[in-house]
Amino acid sequence: MSQPVRHFLDISELPLQELRNMLDASAAMKAKLKAHEKAKKPLEGKTLAMIFERPSTRTRVSFDVGMRQLGGESIMLTGAEMQLGRGETIADTARVLSRYVDAIMIRILNHEALLELAAYATVPVINGLTRRSHPCQVMADLMTFEEHRGPIEGRTVAWTGDDNNVLASWAHAAERFKFKLNVATPPQFAPNKAMKDWIKATQAPIVLGADPEEAVRGADCVVTDTWVSMGDKEGEHRHNVLKPYQVNAKLMSLAKKDAIFMHCLPAHRGEEVTDEVIDGPQSVVFDEAENRLHAQKGILAWCFGAVA
Ligand code: CP
Ligand code: NVA
């Protein structure tokens, strides 16, 4: 019997052991690369189609380089230059691409479209960011946390800012990897009912609140992200409401002394984070960016069955 297709759509959809296997594989491949050891090429002859409906620096480059390092190749596509932009359905696009390529990575705001693509594709589909979640990012973040501070289980991560896709994936990770997630958002930019219901149903160790100081107190890691995600409307009101959620030296000083600071980047310096923090000794944002490459190699290897 053929194996089910291994889509990487959300951290909440996958068993902890498989997520852990991906992270272990990522760490092993990173160590080999750093030691200049000859690495296996498990994706030799494989092609990844990358579809970007929205801009990207990290996701685009790290997937491309990751495929090359694993022995495969990638094709870069944008929705606008495909027939998708002229109304070809997601389902037909999935069926056609599945005849050419061995996996598809897509960045598309509409999460339902991602799910539809996965439903009709006969090759693995990877979520490269939707409005709802950004699981590849948080796999890299978990890897980064553990490199700096050891196992994340039982530790405390604090999120301050608005509710967004990166926060959703952190929430999914907190449930799977069993760490505490303290969330501080203004009430009008708080997680929606679906997320609140999910937290209740899964009993995930997540505390939702509105006070950034309370959220970061005693945290091992402080995380924030842009106040205006792709697809959000810019606005003075948004910035004014989010101002008290900025990660600055004063807020950071309330976390544990050895707390690390993470941000998926791109950062809006002076808005959600000050230069002092993002360029300071507690910041690991560029390790985090680098780990997009290594973490995604683990994800790709899992999608192709090279990792259990
Ligand atoms: N963090 C992240 O996904 O960055 P890009 O938008 O540059 O891919
Ligand atoms: N929350 C941000 C993440 C960017 C990588 C966005 O969706 O724009």
Image: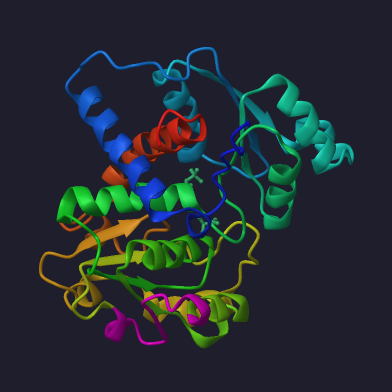
State the image coordinates of residue 8 (x, y, percent, origin top left): 54, 45
Q: Nearer the viewer, residue 262 or 73?
A: 73
Is 20 drawn above or below residue 26 in the view shown? below
Q: Is residue 60 left or right of residue 125?
A: left
Residue at point 44%, 31% (across, down) = 301
Residue at point 14%, 72% (across, down) = 256
Question: Which corner quadrant holds the C terminus?
Answer: top left
The region drawn magenta spans 200-215
Which of the 4 image quarters holds residue 1? top right
State the image coordinates of residue 210 (x, y, percent, origin top left): 42, 87
What colour-coding does the image apply? rainbow
Is 119 drawn above or below residue 11 in the view shown? above
Which of the 4 image quarters holds residue 188? bottom right
Question: Is residue 292 among what the camera can see?
Answer: yes
State the image coordinates of residue 104 (x, y, percent, origin top left): 63, 33
Residue at point 39%, 16% (across, down) = 41
Is 122 drawn above or below residue 70 in the view shown? below
Q: Residue furthest left?
A: 257
Q: Residue furthest right?
A: 87
Question: Is residue 266 among what the camera can see?
Answer: no
